[in-house]
Image (spheres, grey):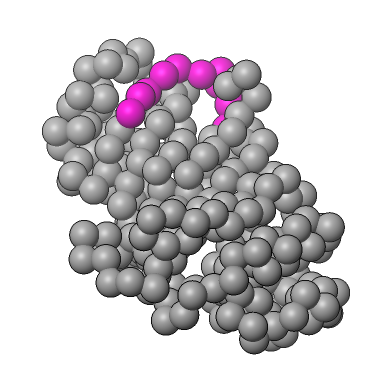
Amino acid sequence: MGRYFIHLAYNGTNYCGWQTQPELPTVQQTLESALSTLLRQKIAVVGCGRTDTGVHASDFYAHFDAEDAIDCGQLVFKLNNLLPPDIAIFDIFPVADNAHARFDATARTYQYHVSDRRLPFRQGQYCRIYFKPDIDKMNEAARVLMEYEDFTSFAKLHTQVKTNICHLTHAEWTEEESGWVFTIRSNRFLRNMVRSVTGTLLDVGRGKLSIDGLREIVERKDRCAAGVSMPACGLFLTKVEYPWQG
């Protein structure tokens, strides 16, 4: 029995998230089915995290165990021919038997894309807003967020997690030709955290929320105090980091 990592990407538009759900299309189920077909054995895949319905990943890792040694290059080729075109396999490589795609990850980076324009060729990959946000105010607010560790106010309610402590190392808005992008990096994220943080920062960007108001929201540790959760379509997991990457 050997363990292998898969490096992949997917467009989440047509999937009900990463994690397998009964009678619903998911990335995990689609990948497990293809691997089981090609390797002629039941394959279970463990992902580096769970993305929600409609969320995309341009950098994602998963691991699986196989009974026999495999030709990784051939398996990449065959998977990319068998899988639907919205899932791409970049690489498959052997790892130590105790390597874990989720628990070994040291940091993750997400990006959220918004625009005040209609972008017909990016449908399902950004969220349209109907105002021009003040990017300087939003970046001031993002820097305030990095002063905190407890993000209870931005966590989905009734989830089973041991702690709501996250160590942010980057939070910044940038402007591009078609709109604005929020990039956030942390050792871990809470369920729905990035989308609710983005919605709250956009409230700052349109003058609906002050910097002091943001501090009050964080310190209340109450999800009901924060801004709306943004739609899934604008969210991308863009980087997953491991110690072996150097």
Q: Quadrant of residue 76?
A: top left
Please state the horizontal and vertical placement of residue 195, each as a whole percent of the image: 55, 67
Would you say residue 211 sits in the magenta stretch?
Answer: no
Which of 41 and 221 lies nearest the eye of the viewer?
A: 221
Which of 192 and 101 lies nearest the eye of the viewer?
A: 192
Name the residue located 84 percent from the left edge and 57 percent from the top edge.
147
Which of 162 and 123 lies nearest the eye of the viewer?
A: 123
Taking the image as shown, residue 3 lies to the left or right of residue 187, namely left
Name the residue located 58 percent from the left edge and 26 percent from the top edge.
99
Please state the horizontal and vertical placement of residue 240, each as a whole percent of the image: 54, 38
Tell me: residue 146, above or below residue 227.
above
Please state the horizontal and vertical placement of residue 156, each as a whole percent of the image: 62, 73
Taking the image as shown, residue 24 lies to the left or right of residue 106, namely left
Name the image quarter holding the C terminus: top right
Q: Quadrant of residue 96?
A: top right
Tell me: residue 100, above or below residue 205.
above
Q: Quadrant of residue 31?
A: top left
Taking the image as shown, residue 29 lies to the left or right of residue 246, namely left
Name the residue located 40 percent from the left edge and 43 percent from the top edge.
58
Q: What stretch of residues is rendered in magenta?
A: 90-100
Name the image quarter holding the N terminus: top left
- Can see residue 159? no
Q: How many marks?
A: 0
Would you say residue 99 sits in the magenta stretch?
Answer: yes
- Can see residue 113? yes
Please state the horizontal and vertical placement of residue 27, each as a whole percent of the image: 33, 51
Name the residue located 51 percent from the left edge and 19 percent from the top edge.
95
